[in-house]
Amino acid sequence: MLSRLGILVMQLLGRLPLAWVRALGYSLGWALYFLVVPRRRVALTNLRLCFPNQPEAQRRAMAHRTFIHFAQAWLDRGWLWHGLPEVTRRRLTLIGAVAELDGNEPVVIFAPHFVGLDAGWTALTQQLPRRFTTIYTNQANEIVDAWILAGRQRFGSVRLFGRIDGVKTIVAALRSGEPLYLLPDMSFGQESSVFVPFYGVLAATVPSLSRFAKLGRAKVVPVVTRMTRQGYEVEVMPAWPDFPSDDAVADTARMNQRLQSYIDAMPDQYFWVHKRFKDRPPGTPSVY
């Protein structure tokens, strides 16, 4: 019942002016920051580890803004998935080296975990003619799961692979010219990750960007989505000329290093509420 009501609220939000949606998100972010204490502690721990030289007051202010952007981005799904197509398109601006996504060349899109991830996906699938793919993790709630799946398949001809589909199916689509929108800057458990530095701290990181690029004989194109007052800017960056190599661990370390430069440009829009350092090297105590 609550799931259906929540989806109805999102559908209604899709009809409101963007300024109203963002104002609601601002208030929700304030509430979440003060009420959801465990996640606030996670965000503050991540920021302390990644920005140890910043004053604590500055890190707290950044965490607060992160909660606000997170809440605003969540409510933006109302117009991303239910708003008029012309409204959605007007609020999503593709910029940068968009020509990198022309043609049928195999492409792995490196899409870091900024709050605008869904906006970036929507912009690509609505505004570009290619058939995009991504990897989807099913939600426990069937109603919410169906809603998210429908939202991410709203525009274009897209394919969402489950993790049970296996690597071969994903690589086959990649080689056939279907760009893979990949979110590899997290850990999916120590057994499938490698430990590489992230802001100087060893972080379990899945090496899938290097492996998919190598298996798919694909170039890697970063796409970074930035929340703005008008909606979102989706920046397509030039393909990395030196990626992948024959060393997946070194490639993953380089991925994190380049990711840091993207985060430094808008640190309060990164997904700091995630337990980025949950998996630790053997013998290393938990930080949470």
Image (tube, grey):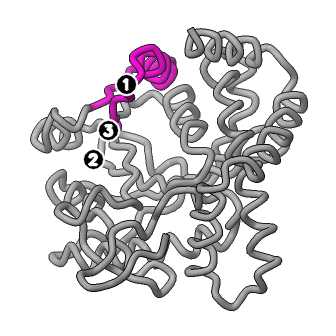
Magenta residues, start to end = 134-161
Q: Which residue is mark 1?
A: 158
In the rendered view, does 282 fall on the left or right side of 59?
left
- Left or right? Give the position of 86 relative to 279: right
Mark 2 vs mark 3: give the one in front. Answer: 3
Q: Residue 128: horizontal and vertical position, in percent?
A: 50, 31
Q: Is residue 101 left or right of residue 214?
A: right
Quadrant position of residue 26: top right
Any magenta on residue 247? no
Q: Amino acid at mark 1?
A: Val
Q: Nearer the viewer, residue 182 or 69?
A: 69
Q: Label 3 amino acid?
A: Ile
Q: Give the residue at mark 3.
A: 135
> The N terminus is located in which quarter?
top right
- Camera-nearest label, 1 or 3: 3
130 lies above or below 276: above
Question: Residue 40 or 119: which is nearer the viewer?
Answer: 40
Please provide percent x and percent y for residue 268.
71, 62
Q: Give neighbour class at mark 1: few <14, some 14-19, many 20+ (Cα, 10 Å).
A: some
Residue type beneath disc 2: Pro
Q: Residues within 10 Å of mark 3 (few under 14, many from 20)?
A: some
Nearer to us: label 2 or label 1: 1
Q: Is residue 163 above or below residue 275?
A: above
What numbered label is drawn on residue 106?
A: 2
Q: CA distance from mark 2 to mark 1?
A: 15 Å
Mark with earlier residue (2, 3): 2
Residue 116 visible in the snapshot: yes
Neighbour class for label 2 at 10 Å: few (<14), some, many (≥20)?
many
